[in-house]
Image (cartoon, grey):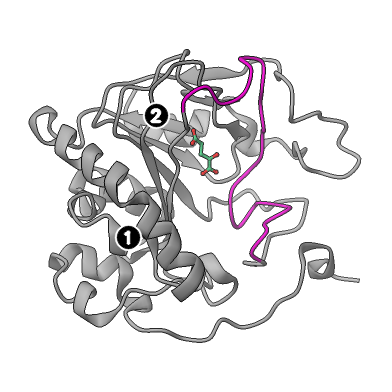
């Protein structure tokens, strides 16, 4: 099935070999080395994590990936709203562990007050999360769980009164395994969870969230994490387009905690 068709029907797809096999080892090492400094720069100075992903960043403008995103959003202008380190440390959680959720702007408990779409979600794609496998994803090291087709399910694992225990296995869940250099794309509405890592190696991975031009990215810490000009200016042109809205620091607007975001 074509990637865009799978994304639309199943809520996710896998892009094989976005980072060439002979390059991904170095990118992985760079991400492992930079993660601590990158997390600190974000916590203390609001720098986007991409500022510490310089060898990975050029691949964010991969033409195959952007074609899927632009087709899904039906518009050429796509931006990256959030960038995060998502590695799963060794020996993390028992194998039955889950934490099913949907992603911003459909994350009902977003901790950084980025704003959210309340239930019921409109039947429209609003963001795509890309999950970058910088190490092979396997059932043993915590490959991502998805529940196919839940992007169109009116219920939510974190929905009050929906009766779903997102901390356990969910019927029809599937684990998306792949090789280093592959990228999973998920509709932000699909129920998904990182897996448990029972190995003694880190599952190195990164997340970048792609959003259409019309989605506000002015709220919350993660959306407003910025890229200092001296780093931005060194990015390839295609990557600059994805981050140009965050080239310098802007103060985020305040929108309140998730429970205050309901229309009363
Ligand atoms: O790391 C993973 O496998 C899943 C990432 C995830 O759940 C997220 O970024 O929302």
Q: Earlier in the sequence, mark 2 or mark 1?
A: 1
Residue at the limit of the structure toward the left, as seen here:
22
Query: Is 169 left or right of 143, judged from the image as shown?
Result: right
Which of the two residues, 116 or 122, is positioned nearer the viewer here? 116
To which residue does mark 2 refer? 202
Q: At 52% from the left edge and 65% from the top edge, which residue is drawn?
A: 222
Residue 55 counted in the magenta span: no
Residue at (32% x, 79% y) in the render: 247
The picture places residue 42, in percent across and down from the top left corner, at: 45, 66
| Residue 216 sits above or below residue 122 on the image | below
Which residue is painted at 53% across and 50% down in the image? 125
Q: Position of residue 129 (x, y in %)?
A: 45, 46
- Viewer-proximal residue among 214 and 91: 91
- Picture coordinates of residue 162, whole percent (x, y): 86, 36
Q: Which residue is mark 1?
A: 50
SS of the residue under disc 2:
loop
| Circle 2 residues within 10 Å: few <14, some 14–19, many ≥20 | some
The residues tagged by marks 2 and 1 sit, at their Cα atoms, a distance apart of 20 Å
Quarter of the image with the C terminus is bottom right
The secondary structure type at the circle numbered 1 is helix
Q: In what quadrant of the picture does the N terminus appear? A: top left
Is residue 161 shown above or below 218? above
Q: Residue at x 41, y 16 (%)?
A: 138
Q: Which residues are magenta?
A: 90-112
Label 1 residue near ligand 1, CB within 8 Å: no
User: Magenta region's main secondary structure?
Assistant: loop
Residue 92 among those drawn in magenta? yes
Identify whether 10 is placed above or below 212: above
x, y percent for residue 145 = 55, 25
Foreground disc of the pair 2, 1: 2
């Amino acid at each position: 099935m074509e990637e865009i068709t799978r994304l639309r029907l199943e809520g996710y797809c896998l892009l094989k070999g976005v980072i060439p096999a002979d390059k991904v080892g170095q990118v992985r090492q760079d991400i492992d080395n930079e993660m601590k400094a990158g997390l600190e720069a974000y916590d203390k100075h609001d720098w986007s994590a991409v500022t510490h992903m310089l060898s990975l960043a050029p691949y964010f403008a991969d033409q195959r990936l952007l074609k899927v995103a632009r087709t899904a959003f039906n518009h050429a202008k796509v931006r990256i709203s959030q960038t995060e380190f998502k590695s799963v440390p060794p020996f993390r959680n028992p194998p039955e562990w889950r934490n099913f959720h949907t992603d911003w702007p459909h994350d009902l408990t977003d901790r950084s007050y980025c704003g959210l779409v309340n239930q019921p979600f409109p039947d429209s794609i609003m963001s795509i999360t890309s999950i970058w496998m910088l190490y092979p994803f396997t059932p043993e090291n915590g490959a991502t769980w998805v529940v196919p087709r839940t992007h169109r399910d009116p219920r939510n694992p974190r929905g009050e009164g929906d009766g779903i225990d997102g901390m356990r296995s969910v019927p029809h869940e599937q684990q998306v395994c792949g090789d280093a250099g592959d990228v999973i794309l998920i509709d932000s509405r699909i129920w998904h969870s990182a897996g448990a890592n029972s190995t003694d190696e880190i599952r190195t991975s990164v997340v970048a969230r792609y959003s259409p031009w019309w989605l506000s990215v002015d709220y919350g810490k993660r959306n407003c994490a910025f890229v200092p000009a001296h780093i931005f200016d060194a990015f390839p042109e295609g990557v600059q387009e994805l981050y140009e809205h965050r080239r310098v620091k802007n103060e985020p607007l305040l929108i309140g905690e998730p429970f205050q975001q309901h229309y009363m």
